[in-house]
Image (cartoon, rainbow, N blue to C red):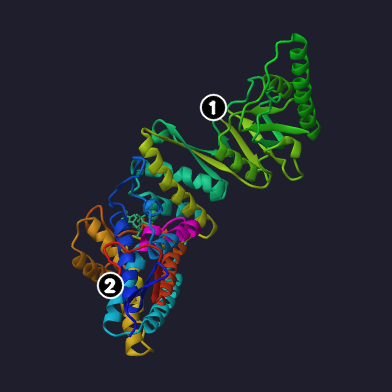
């Protein structure tokens, strides 16, 4: 028999059962890191990086992104979380917890002598039942707006945004009605959360270079990442004649560029660097609005929004670099919007910087959730209800497979219940009692019994809803990745494993 552990050209190779154990162990380590953050009563984590920067967060995806995992399995799980976030904006913690639990159950089955291929079959079958069931059980709302607001409130619960849930939910859905998530910007400002609002267009906190510049316009917009000034003369001159010559050359150079821009017929210049006072005067005279010192992150966003590109060198400008859109100068900001593509900005006021970052992360998820639901207002009951219902549906589907496959199907159902179990734990509730009660009450009171973590009891919670695609997407992603990991029987590690000595 092949030894489980051997060295291969300086790399560490783990194979067979040993590799599977290692995978399960790592997956559980990663999921344990985020488990305690799940749900409204999830705990916050303080992350401190190597430079001593602190970050207090309850967001599973953020914690995972900050885990410096060198282990290939750990990395893969973090990728799963990122993929879930990129696709569905929410449900990342649930997805990772599910990966851990499905692997743990698989490991138990392997211990009992069931081959990973059989488990894979059972898991796939259970996933099919689950997906179908969620499809059938989903609620189709008449009012996408109301549906989005409800789900946004669920997504924001427990994310240090609670005290202004209604207000934040309203502006989040406003933003999602105006623009797609990638065109929604969040600007963090000091103040009271209740002053937060949604603005039509991408807002930048800049002022036009000169107050007399045009305040509103439409047409070509140049997004420039270059100082709009004559080139610096790198020499020491004492001859006044020479100095005048150089100054003249500089002026001509600048004039040349400005004439070029005027000929292009642009209506606004958004510049990341400085703009020479002569250029400012010129733009003002020509009815062109110009702003300088615009943030780098805004530059890219604006360029995309107006279907142009950030220009790094005016002399090398190409067709398609110049975008087109509208700008509107307001009292403390300027909004920009693109032709045919909506943009929105959430002006988020918070009393502290720390709160700002955490609410921003929560709003990022929430904006995505709102957008998904405005397009397709289909939800499932949250608070662990859908997982209990789905698990029941899986268990009660008549088995048409071998006993061993059926064992895996049932293990899958049980694994789904990790979500209500974790929620119950976070609320200090008895896990076994909670699940038993949920099942019992489902038959008597309502099929949608959830874990009311705040009141510490099982209750029907019609206001706690999640987009169906987030819930079933998380199940699918977790299952697919678990299956891929179950197929792995060799790990090649570049580095020595912690706590294990080379043979
Ligand atoms: P994820 O990253 O998976 O979205 P969250 O920390 O956002 O993790 O927690 C989501 C879970 O919390 C979902 O199962 C959701 O149904 C549940 N949840 C949200 N609001 C409530 C609530 N008021 N009561 C109970 N559970 C809730
Ligand atoms: Mg969430």
- Dot 1 lies on which element? loop
Find out whether residue 416 is within the magenta segment: no
- At which x and y percent is residue 319? 77, 44
Residue 114 lies, in percent from the top left, at 32, 85
The local secondary structure at tag 2 comes to: helix
Whether residue 284 is visible to the viewer of this picture, yes or no, is: yes
Taking the image as four quarters, which one is ligand 1 found in?
A: bottom left
Which residue lies under the disc numbered 2? 443
Q: Is residue 482 above or below residue 405?
A: above
Rendered position, 181 above or below 228? below
Q: Nearer the viewer, residue 384 or 61?
A: 61
* Residue receiving disc 1: 332
Q: Splitting the image into 4 quarters, where does residue 109 fall?
A: bottom left
Q: Is residue 87 magenta?
A: yes
Label 2 neighbour load within 10 Å: few <14, some 14-19, many 20+? few
Q: Quadrant of the N terminus?
A: bottom left
For the point 69% across and 44% down, the residue is 308
Say whether mark 1 is within 8 Å of ligand 2.
no
């Amino acid at each position: 028999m092949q030894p489980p552990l051997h060295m291969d050209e300086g790399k560490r190779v783990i194979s067979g059962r040993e590799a599977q154990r290692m995978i399960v162990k790592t997956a559980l380590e990663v999921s344990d890191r985020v488990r305690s953050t799940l749900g409204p009563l999830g705990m916050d984590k303080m992350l401190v990086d190597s430079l001593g920067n602190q970050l207090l967060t309850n967001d599973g995806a953020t914690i995972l992104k900050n885990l410096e995992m060198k282990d290939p399995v750990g990395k893969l799980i973090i990728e799963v979380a990122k993929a879930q976030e990129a696709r569905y904006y929410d449900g990342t913690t649930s997805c990772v917890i599910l990966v851990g639990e499905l692997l743990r159950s698989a490991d138990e089955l392997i211990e009992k002598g069931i081959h990973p291929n059989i488990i894979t079959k059972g898991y796939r079958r259970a996933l099919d039942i689950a997906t179908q069931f969620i499809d059938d059980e989903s609620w189709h709302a008449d009012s996408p707006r109301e549906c989005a607001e409800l789900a946004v409130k669920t997504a924001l619960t427990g994310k240090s945004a609670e005290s202004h849930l209604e207000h934040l939910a309203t502006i989040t859905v406003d933003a999602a009605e105006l623009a797609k998530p990638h065109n929604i910007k969040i600007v963090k400002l000091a103040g009271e959360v209740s002053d937060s609002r949604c603005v039509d267009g991408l807002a930048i906190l800049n002022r036009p270079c000169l107050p007399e510049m045009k305040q509103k316009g439409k047409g070509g917009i140049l997004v420039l990442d270059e100082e709009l000034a004559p080139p610096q003369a790198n020499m020491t001159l004492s001859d006044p004649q020479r100095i005048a010559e150089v100054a003249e050359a500089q002026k001509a150079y600048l004039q040349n560029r400005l004439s070029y821009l005027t000929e292009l017929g642009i209506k606004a210049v958004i510049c990341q660097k400085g703009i020479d006072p002569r250029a400012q005067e010129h733009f003002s005279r020509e009815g062109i609005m110009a702003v300088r010192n615009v943030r780098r992150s805004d530059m890219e966003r604006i360029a995309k929004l107006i279907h142009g590109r950030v220009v790094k060198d005016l002399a090398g400008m190409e067709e398609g670099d110049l975008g087109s859109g509208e700008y509107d100068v307001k009292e403390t900001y300027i909004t920009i919007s693109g032709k045919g593509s909506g943009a929105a900005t959430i002006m988020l006021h918070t009393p502290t910087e720390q709160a700002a970052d955490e609410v921003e992360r929560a709003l990022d998820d929430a904006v995505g959730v709102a957008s998904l639901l405005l397009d397709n207002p289909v939800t499932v009951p949250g608070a662990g209800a859908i997982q209990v219902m789905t698990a029941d549906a899986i268990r009660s589907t008549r088995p048409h497979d071998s006993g061993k496959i059926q064992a895996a199907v049932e293990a899958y159902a049980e694994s789904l219940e990790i979500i209500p179990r974790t929620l119950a734990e976070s609320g200090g509730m008895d896990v076994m009692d909670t699940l038993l009660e949920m099942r019992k009450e489902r038959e008597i009171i309502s099929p949608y019994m959830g874990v009311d973590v705040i009141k510490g009891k099982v209750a029907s919670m019609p206001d706690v809803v999640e987009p169906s695609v987030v819930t079933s997407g998380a199940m699918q992603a977790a299952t697919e990745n678990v299956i891929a990991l179950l197929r792995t029987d060799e790990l090649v590690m570049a580095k020595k494993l912690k706590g294990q000595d080379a043979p």
